[in-house]
Amino acid sequence: MAKQTFTVGQVLTAAQVTSLQQTAMLGGAAQAKTASYTLVAADAGTAISMTSTSATTITVNTGLFAAGDTVFIQNLGSGNLTITAGTATVATAGSLILPQNDAGVLYFVSTSSSVFYDFIQVGAASPLTTKGDLYTFGTSDTRLAVGTNGQVLTADSSEPTGLKFATPAGGGKVLQVVEGSTSTQTSSSSTTFADSGLTATITPSSATSKVLVIVNQSGTGKTNGNVDSNLQIQLLRGATVLGTHFVIGYTGTSLVNFVGSANLMKLDSPATTSATTYKTQIKNEQSAAEVSVQRNGSLSTIILMEIGA
């Protein structure tokens, strides 16, 4: 029932009372609309029902309604209905967009200002489409699509919603470990480096990864001979020398000296995703005596650890 003016002593009919009751309860007959519509003064106290498959609007202008007037608005169509401020202002704590089967009350606080109370939900139809999607906000309610397995939610101010799913940084994490070992004794009296028998191969998962190489060469030492004889061990990646351990077992005399283990450690940057071999080689600084590793079956090990960049 449209807003009416009554006089003192006027007797209302049953139909008028029923209509007033329905209006107070936000019920009663509704004006059916199928296209965008601009409110008129006669709409005060009535219900408007929009049915359209396309997006439509209800426009609100100033100077048509008094403070305290209300208009009940519902959307039965599949197209969104938007409450639009024309010359009047329309405030809301919810949304001015009504999806299908949503409704609300437009309440006028003055002739030029109104508040829209969205009954069913805050916001338009849910933008979520997939399991794991997040309801976020940029300039409007927005769907943040679920990330892929292993990704994490990350704050990023450059994104429209300030959030994104991203693969966590792998820096400093151990990605894989490879071990090589040998207990076969290797001896040499040559001043030229030769393989010690200790080797291991790793295939990095990323060209930016580093490889931490840890070597424990056991059973090391020299026999009697030249006073300057001593064992030297070098670490190689392929044919590239990464470091050398000098004067192992040196005594400054011709005495025998076996010193147990010699250790080498190197954080290498192979810059490849191809299979990469690390090994050690040995030699004697002087050829007058013999040097050896893995003596008497001592176990030597080399450990390769891929470290994420």
Image (tube, rainbow, N blue to C red):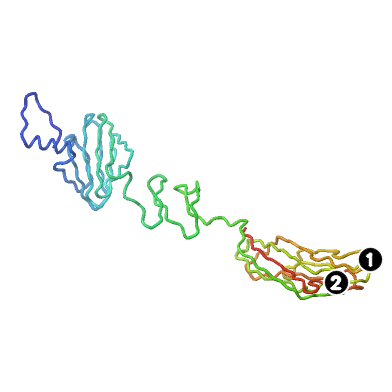
Give the secondary structure at mark 2.
strand
Marks 2/1: CA–CA distance: 14 Å
Q: Position of residue 163 (x, y in %)?
A: 47, 49
Task: For label 1, count other residues whose C-alpha is less than 10 Å away and answer few (under 14), some (14-19) or many (20+).
Answer: few
Which of disc 1 and disc 2 is earlier in sequence? Answer: 1
Q: Which quarter of the figure is the N terminus placed in? A: top left
Task: For label 2, count other residues whose C-alpha is less than 10 Å away and answer few (under 14), some (14-19) or many (20+).
Answer: many
Q: Quadrant of residue 42?
A: top left
Nearest the eye: 116 or 280 = 280
Q: Position of residue 28 (x, y in %)?
A: 14, 41
Nearest the eye: 226 or 135 = 226
**Do residues under tags 2 and 1 come within 8 Å of each other at their CB atoms?**
no
Q: Which quarter of the figure is the C terminus placed in? A: bottom right
Amino acid at dot 2 = Val
Amino acid at dot 1 = Thr
Q: Is residue 140 left or right of residue 302?
A: left
Q: Which mark is residue 291?
A: 2
Say above or below: 191 vs 101.
below
Q: Which mark is residue 81?
A: none
Residue shown at 37% from the left, 47% from the top: 141
Q: Quadrant of residue 259?
A: bottom right
Residue shown at 32% from the left, 41% from the top: 94
Give the secondary structure at mark 1.
loop
Which residue bears the numbered disc 1?
253
Q: Position of residue 107 (x, y in %)?
A: 25, 34
Q: Position of residue 112 (x, y in %)?
A: 27, 31
